[in-house]
Amino acid sequence: MNYTIIDGERYSMSDLETLTGKSEPSEPRGHVLLLARVLKDPVSLPRFLDEICSLELDKEDKRNLRMALIRVQIDSELRMTEDLQRYQQRRYVAQVVEILLFKELLLAPGEPEELD
């Protein structure tokens, strides 16, 4: 697995690519690094809740963060057969963070809409 060191901490390039949507992310924002730390160890989510809930983001960063969370959910669903527990936990983290920050899941199953 390919890693990079940022501020003395090791991050998975695969995670950073998923979170940023870029094949070679450079200088990821603080909220991206925060999510990467939680995704590295999903059971650490409870310890990061205060930091996550107190994120102050501008409109563009909020949009980018939500897209990152959606990418993690999609990636997790697509890779679920590789490692069921790992990808269930990653999807759960992304869903919890999305609900905490945006009050709803964009990819949540809902009532089927009738087609005209």
Image: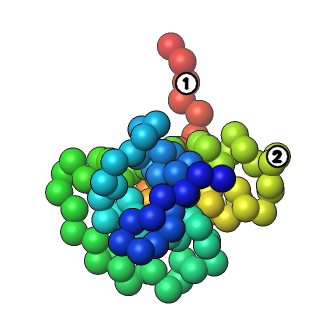
- Secondary structure, mark 2, is loop
- Where residue 75 appears, as percent x and y from the top left, is 61, 44
C-alpha separation, residue under disc 1 versus residue under disc 2: 32 Å
Residue at the image point whose x is 53% and y is 83% from the top: 46
Nearest the eye: 97 or 14: 14
Toward which corner of the image does residue 12 lie, by quadrant?
Answer: bottom right
Q: What amino acid is at disc 1?
A: Glu
Label 1 or label 2, whichever lies nearer to me, is 2
- Where 114 falls versus 106 (above or below)? above
- Secondary structure, mark 1, is loop
Residue at the image point whose x is 46% and y is 72% from the top: 9
- Where 19 falls versus 51 (above or below)? above
Residue at the image point whose x is 30% and y is 58% from the top: 29
Toward which corner of the image does residue 93 lie, by quadrant?
Answer: bottom right
- Where residue 43 appears, as percent x and y from the top left, is 63, 78
Q: What amino acid is at disc 2?
A: Thr
Label 1 or label 2, whichever comes before in sequence order: 2
Q: Is residue 97 visible?
A: no
Nearest the eye: 46 or 41: 41
Q: Which mark is residue 81?
A: 2
Residue at the image point whose x is 29% and y is 77% from the top: 54
Q: Is residue 56 visible?
A: yes
Nearest the eye: 12 or 62: 12
Say few, some or many: other residues with alpha carbon within 10 Å of mark 1 (under 14 / 14 to 19 / 20 or more): few
Left or right: where 18 falls relative to 62: right
Left or right: where 106 falls relative to 114: left
Q: Identify residue for label 1.
A: 114
